[in-house]
Image (cartoon, rainbow, N blue to C red):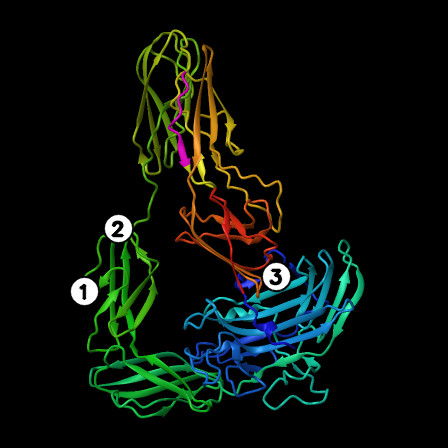
Amino acid sequence: MSKKLGRLAFAVVAATAVGSSLAGVAMAIPVSPGGPRSGKLTQVGPIAEHGFPTWYRDSNDVRLELCTTMDDPLCPALADEVPDPTQPISFPDNFPGESFYQLDGADLTLTSGARAVIGLNLEGAFAADRVVDGDQMVFGRVRIRFDAPAGERYRITHPYGVDDIVATDKGVNMTEDTGAAAGAFGQALAGRVGPFLKWDPSVAPAAPAGYVGDPGVNHKVVGSPYNTNFVRIERLDPASGAVLAQVGYTDLFSIQGRYATNAGVDVDQATYSTDGQHGTLEVFATSEPGQAIEVTGNPALGFRTTRLRGGGNGRYYGRFPITGPVPPGTKIEVSNTGDRPVAKKIKTVVDVVRIEELGYDADAGTLTVKASSSDRTGPALSVTGFGPITGSPFTGVLAPPPAVTVTSAAGGSTTVPLIGTGGVFLPAAPVAAATLDSLAVVGQTVRLDGSGSVGEIDAYSWTQTGGPSVTLTGATERTATFTPAKAGDYTFTLDVAGPGGAGAKATVTFTVADQVAAPKAIVGADQTVTRGRSVTVDGSGSTGVESYAWRQVSGPQVTLSSTTTAKPSFTYPAQALPAAPGPNAGYLYNNDPVVLELTVRNSAGSDVVRTTVRPTADQLTNLSVRFRTDKDEWRISGTDTLVAGQMVTAVLGSTLTGRVIGTPVAVDATGAFSIRVNGPALSGSTTISLVTTTGGRLLAQPVTVTN
């Protein structure tokens, strides 16, 4: 098998991705195999000096290590991934950008004459596609590729499952990566790759000692969790899924993997206690059972190289004498002397912090923290978010954290959950709000409305405090009504009460007229909002209103929350994006403002007013467009002047009606965006155009073409 299959860049792949949403790339639907799964990857080993796990273990107790040497033909680092393959591997200066625990695959010719390549790998790489410490990640990859007419449907059975794929204009081209997130080494355990494949021991020749097989020799394998140690490709009826024909089969694989001989070591904790002259150092480490784990002698601390004690379960413990003070930042070295080369870990020694008293008084707003250090010379202790421990409570603490962390100047820390004391909280006293919800005309019903009151309310009470006397209906309800017999000025007061006590009262004063005046429609000022956000238009300032009627006059179509209330709202629609893969001859770009019209009426007539809501301006700048013909790869980047989480789409050509490049990408927190995908081909186009969901548009941008 060609190892290039495992190495192809994984741009635009999520931590767990099935297939790809790129234009021209087939979408795969994993299908449940006929029987239950039996086996998987089960464990990640200690982190080695290069920042990757020393090994991965599967359910068959097979441990494989990362192939990162240039002198092992059965498990080599890839020469073109190493900056200088003539020099020894070293991290980070001369380290491969991609390497493998398992590099497995099958290569077969279909009945159509097309070459099918299947890759089943456990791969180590770097998140930014360059060697940077801290960016290490490991992912399980299933990749399937072969030429086929667009629209044809295939079922591919392989050692790690079954995939149902419909070919696109690029044939069958599917990649599934699980675990592609920096530092999240355990995510690969959840993928389909695992347990490890190895040569079938019942078929000669036998695998070379120390290896799962020889990658230069195709061979039958074992290890499939479904006992499907083969690749079978079947063409299906696109509609029914019925099998039309088997178009390819092989049970021979190229496999690469080296059994882990090193166990590695992790130092989980190194703590000390001292009175400044004498004390002890405690070391807690993990590795494989039965290892020779030791702490390297440290003359400054006063102990010699000594073996840790193993518990038979992979845990190791040591307790060593120390003399004198322990300066902050002191480090120790722990080694697995049985490894070749010897695995070593450096760990900073810290004190042990104990919280002896912790309490929060909700009535006084005080936080009391008392703590001590195992270093009895007295390193300063402080509470995260509050400051040094002085012996006095922290005051003015209205909302404490759920747990308190105490840190020591000697490096130790501890966190303890907080339990508060004091009286329980009750709802605040409510606040009344009173409005007149109808015209005030002699002989017509007037409604007093207290629905705007806030807080927990158990009782309402309306009282007339001015004007000709009337009889209130519903004086103890949220709304009350009366019918005035005389014109004049009227005043009413609303009292509210609840579990928080009597609330602040509200007063409403208004004039009852002999006859109805014509209404006046009034709306707020025109607005500018970001597309995709909610906006409210306000006609509540209108006067003499019996009814409201809103309608849209122009702009992108919106849906009002109500057309008959004073203050309806709507969501300004996002700009629609061209659909992938395109072309999109009927695509319409519309960034016009939304214009709404309000009509108010009463028995004396009506009035009309309009309001305009414009989309926030959105511009694309700093654009870089590059197309690499050797990889059929687009690299597009730029900056959006508006930072609103919008999506950006790129389209071939000088308008937005052509083929879509990749899929929409989001603008990040700085306004930057980047599209890096394979295909579609230039096809004679020399420009691209871009559009955003917030209305940004950039047309006919030139493309830089390189090999």
**Magenta residues: mostly which secondary structure?**
loop
Q: Is residue 608 above or below residue 426?
A: above
Q: Residue at x 63, y 90 (%)?
A: 208
Q: Quadrant of residue 104?
A: bottom right
Q: Amino acid at mark 3?
A: Gly
Magenta stretch in the rendered image: 520-528
Left or right of 193 in this view: 270 = left
Q: Report x, y in % for residue 274.
A: 24, 82
Residue 540 is inside the magenta segment? no
Asked whether residue 622 is in view, the answer is: yes
Is residue 523 shown in magenta? yes
Pick whichever of labels 3 and 2 is earlier in the sequence: 3
Rendering coords of residue 684 (x, y %): 60, 53
Q: Which residue is mark 2?
A: 363
Tell me if residue 536 can be seen: no
Q: Secondary structure at mark 2?
A: loop
> Quick check: 300 left or right of 315?
left
Q: Earlier in the sequence, mark 3 or mark 1?
A: 3
Quote the CA–CA distance across marks 1 and 2.
22 Å
The image's mark for residue 462 is none
Callout in the foreground (1, 2): 1
Q: Amino acid at mark 1?
A: Thr
- Specify the amino acid type for callout 2: Asp
Q: Which residue is mark 3?
A: 19
Q: Nearer the viewer, residue 685 or 139?
A: 685
* Figure quadrant of the C terminus: bottom right
Going by the image, does 261 lie left or right of 192? left
Q: CA distance from mark 3 to mark 2?
A: 57 Å
Q: Residues within 10 Å of mark 3 (few under 14, many from 20)?
A: many
